[in-house]
Image (cartoon, grey):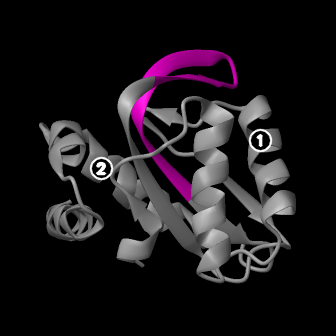
Amino acid sequence: MLDPDLLVPDLKADNKIAAIKELTNRLYLKGVVKDSLSFLQAVLGRENIESTLIGEVAMPHARSLAVNQLGLALGVSPLPLDYPSGDERRTIQVICLIAVPAHAPDSYLALLGALARTFQEGGMIGDLLRAGTPEALCKLLATHSRHS
């Protein structure tokens, strides 16, 4: 599931929607998503309904016919982004976008749980902010996910 092409240590986006769009484009380029606009709309619609903030991390996700397979793209912003989600609003620097195929609506629950445990580990957010390369992010996530 961890693909360095889907791990962005230096998001260019300066706001929530642009960050989600940047990660959606990565999922599209890797074939995880077949219709980036449709998926983006599904994610933003989901964001308006209920918060996807878990601690210091945003975990936007959506189930959509535009998704070919379960996938995730993770981005780290060098600067804090204002992130309104549902009834909550925080500044965050780590976004983990999860694409869920419509035919497998529960397939993401184990992934979401594992990510939440991984991100709650002490020092994990700081480690992600310092990673610097997609490969370093991949190694860090793989190491931590084995321990959670």
| Residue 44 coordinates in the image, percent (x, y) | 77, 41
Is residue 74 in view from this perspective?
A: yes
| Residue 51 coordinates in the image, percent (x, y) | 63, 30
Kind of residue indicated by mark 1? Leu
Q: Is residue 57 left or right of residue 48?
A: left
Residue name at image x 37 percent, y 55 percent? 115
Q: Is residue 36 left or right of residue 87?
A: right
Report if residue 88 lies within the magenta region: yes
Q: Is residue 53 left or right of residue 107?
A: left
Secondary element at tag 2 = helix
Residue name at image x 45 percent, y 46 percent? 11
Q: Main secondary structure of the magenta part?
A: strand
Q: Which mark is residue 120?
A: none
In the picture of the structure, the residue carrying the numbered disc 1 is: 44
Decide: few, some or many residues near mark 1? Use Cα within 10 Å; few <14, some 14-19, many ≥20. some
Question: Which of the two marks, 1 or 2, is nearer to us in this view?
Answer: 1
Quadrant assignment, res 2: bottom left
Q: Quadrant of the C terminus?
A: bottom left
Residue name at image x 46 percent, y 68 percent? 6
Residues in magenta? 81-97
In the picture of the structure, the residue carrying the numbered disc 2 is: 117
Position above or below: 126 against 79:
below
